[in-house]
Amino acid sequence: MKKITRFDQGRIERIFETSEGFLKGDGIVTRTGVFTYVNQDGSLRKELRHPDDVFSLDSLNSLEMIPITNDHPSALVTTDNAKQLSVGTTGENIRPDGKFLVSSVIIRDKGAIEAINNGKRELSLGYTVDLEDAPGEYGGERYDFRQRNIKYNHLAIVIAARAGNKAKLKFDSINCDYAIEQLKKEDNKDKDNSKQKNKEKIMVVKVDCGDGLNYDASPEVANLVKNLTRLNTGLVKKFDSLTDEYNTLKSSTVTVVAERDDFKDKFEKLEKADNSEAISEAADALLKLRKVADSVLDDKTKKKLDTMSESEIKKACVLAKYPNINKDSDDAYVSARFDILCEDSNCNSTAINDQRRKAVPNIKKDNDDLCDADQARNDAFKKMQEAHENKE
């Protein structure tokens, strides 16, 4: 249950003045039944003040000797502000009478007495209450919540009353019983008028429920349908957004799975591939490159070989051997010159193959591995010629 503060109201009509100038008497301060309250969003909520709760001993005791204020204060009355807010008090004579609750009251403040004499005659109880979410029907009227644990804090003199003349205050104690009887009659009359007004009121609002038809409904129902429609629209948009996100993720998942399968196939092919020939060729090329570099480069450049690429080492060797060539020559020309350099440096393949066998064991010795120097020279010049023709 939720604890909140409530204000219920009655009305001053007749009073009597004491010899001291105080206003004193008995009056009806509230009643039982279904009360209507306005929510922050403008919708209406009906709360039941059941006799079992209104007339409970704890609740009645909390109404005895509480401060009377001129208008409701901004906060509940406490020991910190009672002296400046109080213009009178309720009495100890608290009693139920039918659906009404009667209390003795006394007003002592001059300003409040003048306000009452000038027509400010309605009263409003300020109290705390626990709201129980328990919809039902009482006296033929539906309600949404039931007020529990009602504890009164103060009684305020106000201009506008909630209950109107349904809970008039008669400050003349002699006529109080008569006033109560009159109130009962007026309350029944007001109840009949209220039913008629509600009956007339229920046919003034058109409600579109989304099916292309309009329905007659009370403002409360129309407001509820409007709120539910707004909520449903928001939920539909949220659902559509989540659906789009799901479809995007689903599409991405399909792409990722396809890429994974493709990588898996490529990896399996690499595992099965025979790379021994490629390894042998790479070893030959590396040994050939290092031998030429050792024979033509100075010691300073040799120390940098581990950080240089294959093309950089070839170019360094060619420039060291042939310093007059163009430093901006393309890779094809440099490669051809490097092959000539290999021949001039007596780079025979037999020596290279011997070194290769040491680096890569189990390589078969074959006469085909021997290098024909004349053929190599012819191939080198042919590459140079082709490179210059392509450049032109």
Image (cartoon, rainbow, N blue to C red):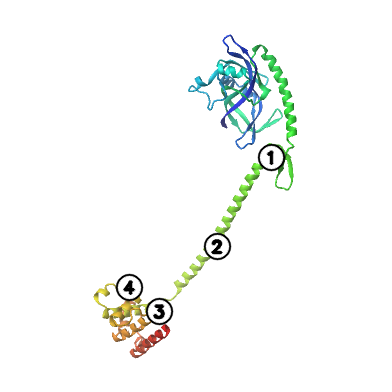
As drawn, the residue found furthest toward the bottom would be 374
What is the spatial separation of the Cα atoms under label 2 and label 4, in whole angstroms? 43 Å
On screen, residue 31 above or below 386 = above
Q: Secondary structure at mark 3?
A: helix
Quarter-of-image position of residue 187? top right
Determine which residue is flagged by label 3.
277
Image coords of residue 289 (percent x, y): 32, 79
Image coords of residue 156 (percent x, y): 58, 22
In screen coordinates, is 375 left or right of 297? right
Report crowding for label 2: few under 14, some 14 to 19, many 20 or more residues within 10 A (C-alpha).
few
Answer with mark 3 or mark 1, whichever residue precedes in sequence. Answer: 1
Q: Which quadrant: the C terminus? A: bottom left
Determine which residue is flagged by label 4.
308
Query: Which residue is at a point 32% across and 76% down the rendered structure image?
Result: 313
Answer with mark 1 or mark 4, whichever residue precedes in sequence. Answer: 1
What is the spatial separation of the Cα atoms under label 1 and label 4, in whole angstroms? 83 Å
What is the spatial separation of the Cα atoms under label 3 and label 4, in whole angstroms? 25 Å
Answer with mark 3 or mark 4, whichever residue precedes in sequence. Answer: 3
Q: Amino acid at mark 2?
A: Val
Q: Amino acid at mark 4?
A: Met
Report whether residue 343 is seen.
yes
Report crowding for label 3: few under 14, some 14 to 19, many 20 or more residues within 10 A (C-alpha).
few
Determine which residue is flagged by label 1.
222
Answer with mark 1 or mark 2, whichever residue precedes in sequence. Answer: 1
Please identify, in this view, whether the residue under mark 3 or under mark 4 is nearer the observer.
4
Answer with mark 2 or mark 4, whichever residue precedes in sequence. Answer: 2
* Total numbered circles: 4
